[in-house]
Amino acid sequence: QVQLVESGGGLVQAGGSLRLSCAASGRTFGSYTMGWYRQAPGKERELVAVITSGEPTKYQDSVKGRFTISRDNAKNTVYLQMNSLKPEDTAVYYCAADSYTTYAVLVRSWGQGTQVTVSS
């Protein structure tokens, strides 16, 4: 299991920007696939963006061109840069990591989440 701690959430007006950070434990962070999910009230958790160990990225259609996921393996950190924020981006944002144990068992780890609120 990987320990994940998100930060950077807050209240911002529509059109503004925020950068979320996720700090991860582990000596093999560079091998993890990392992702950002979000969950709005009354809705299911959805994938926002994912970045692999080789750094190819994918995004939910609704955030393409506005959000950028990146990673700094030297700092064991993944980021989500969010620009041109919209009220519909309001949600709790969660960091997730896919990693393998020493017995080659795949484990999904979750952070506790950070609230992002976008006002109109």
Image: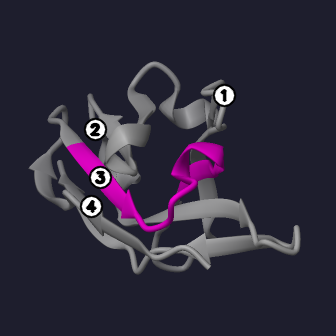
Dot 3 lies on which element? strand
Q: Is 23 covered by the magenta stretch?
A: yes
Dot 1 lies on which element? loop
Q: Which residues are magenta?
A: 19-36
Residue at figure coordinates x 62%, y 79% from the top left: 1
Task: Give the image location of residue 68, x and y in percent.
Answer: 42, 29
Q: From the image, state whether disc 1 or disc 3 is nearer to you.
A: 1
Q: Residues at badges 1 and 2 in contact (C-beta under 8 Å)?
A: no
Q: What residue type is disc 3 on? A: Ser
Q: From the image, state whether disc 2 or disc 3 is nearer to you.
A: 3
Q: What residue type is disc 1 on? A: Gly
Residue 97 falls left or right of residue 83: right
Q: CA distance from mark 2 to mark 3?
A: 17 Å
Q: CA distance from mark 1 to mark 4?
A: 28 Å
Point out which mark residue 21 bears: 3
Would you name the residue on which mark 1 appears?
54
